[in-house]
Image (tube, rainbow, N blue to C red):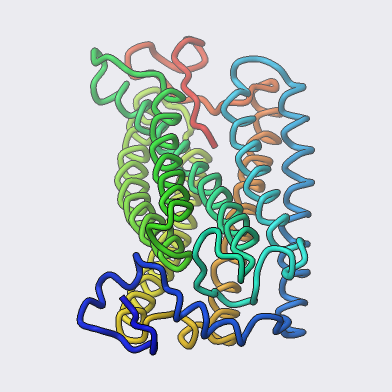
Amino acid sequence: MLPSNGTVTGNSTSLIFSNSTSAIARNKTDIGFPETSFEYETDLFIGALFLATTVVAARRMIWSRQRGGAETTVVTAFYSLILMTSALRSLWFLIPRSLIATTYTPTPMMAFDPNVNWGGAFFSQILVSAGSLCLFSIFILILVYWADILKKYFFPGARRNKPMATFLILVGGLALVQIFNAIFFLLGFYSSEAMMLVNAVLLAIVSVICVCEITIFSQKFRTVLMTLGAINQVSTESQVKRIMWITVTGNLFFVTRSVLELIFAASSTIWYFKNGNLETIFSHKIWDIYVWIKYVSEVAILCLMLYILQSRFTKDTVTNGGGAYSKIPDAQGGAAQNNPNSYEPLVV
């Protein structure tokens, strides 16, 4: 705990989970400081990028739903997740900062403190958490469907759960962690700083898991595709390239994200235990760099997913008569074109 004079006692490990009144009082001197002109322009620029992505994803989702048929369900789900991610991000960037934050850089706050805009900071953190959950759900959905398809070919007689049910369970678990994080903040168990740290650690762990799973599944998928293609004399080159695109770009994104969040969490924790707050560590320059790396990479991965989905739709319309799924030849049923029931969705 921090004594009244603001010095750190031996019980420093409880700082992050206590009523940091002294740290909050010190930050009151920062209240009212406007964001810099660069930060204002950054918010407008990145917010406009996310808004444009939102519009494109909305149009694609409507177009996908109009196509009808069960084969478009997964693709529509992808567009929906991209839409929700970009909409939440654009909302966070384009809302005037003075309405949802005391300062542009993170400021320690406790729930229901009448002296600070804790409600705006809480709403801001909820927007960020929800947007991150939707973003990561895109790749969780890919991995769930890849796992289901691979299970069919490696374990033909095994019982397969519905991929969408598995997806909802996994995303629901992550959402539950976020809900408990928000509840603990509202109950005063810890400050807004700890809330940010919990999110950073969670996203870092999920990023590492996604990197491992994408690498393992993509390798198995390429093996299956090339083997079945050779057996049935059906070209799977386009599908293999698509998987490679997802693997490389997905791993680059998640490696960058995990390193960024781990650095954020580690440096924040060390600084907090030494000084009792994050006021100094998050200067405008450091926070601006963090914002640019984190959110520009998100825009890039969302745009890439839109491109991959659009390119496959365009190709499938020409080669598959409008079907929304790529075809995987069946190892037991002969060539794919002779066995319509042998096709599985490649997702993207």
In the depicted structure, whether residue 131 falls above or below residue 41: above
Left or right of 120? Residue 49 is right
- Please report the residue visible at 38 percent of the width from the left and 69 percent of the height from the top: 259
In the depicted structure, whether residue 256 falls above or below residue 140: below
| Tally of marks | 0
- Nearer to us in this view, 46 or 194: 194
- Please report the residue visible at 32 percent of the width from the left and 73 percent of the height from the top: 15
Quadrant in which the N terminus appears: bottom left
- Please report the residue visible at 24 percent of the width from the left and 12 percent of the height from the top: 157
Image quadrant in which you'd find residue 6? bottom left
- Nearer to us in this view, 10 or 114: 114
- Nearer to us in this view, 182 or 214: 182
The picture places residue 276, in percent across and down from the top left corner, at 37, 81
Image quadrant in which you'd find residue 332? top left
The picture places residue 198, in percent across and down from the top left corner, at 39, 59
Image quadrant in which you'd find residue 263? bottom left
Quadrant in which the C terminus appears: top right
Left or right of 43? Residue 252 is left
Left or right of 330? Residue 323 is right
The picture places residue 344, in percent across and down from the top left corner, at 46, 22
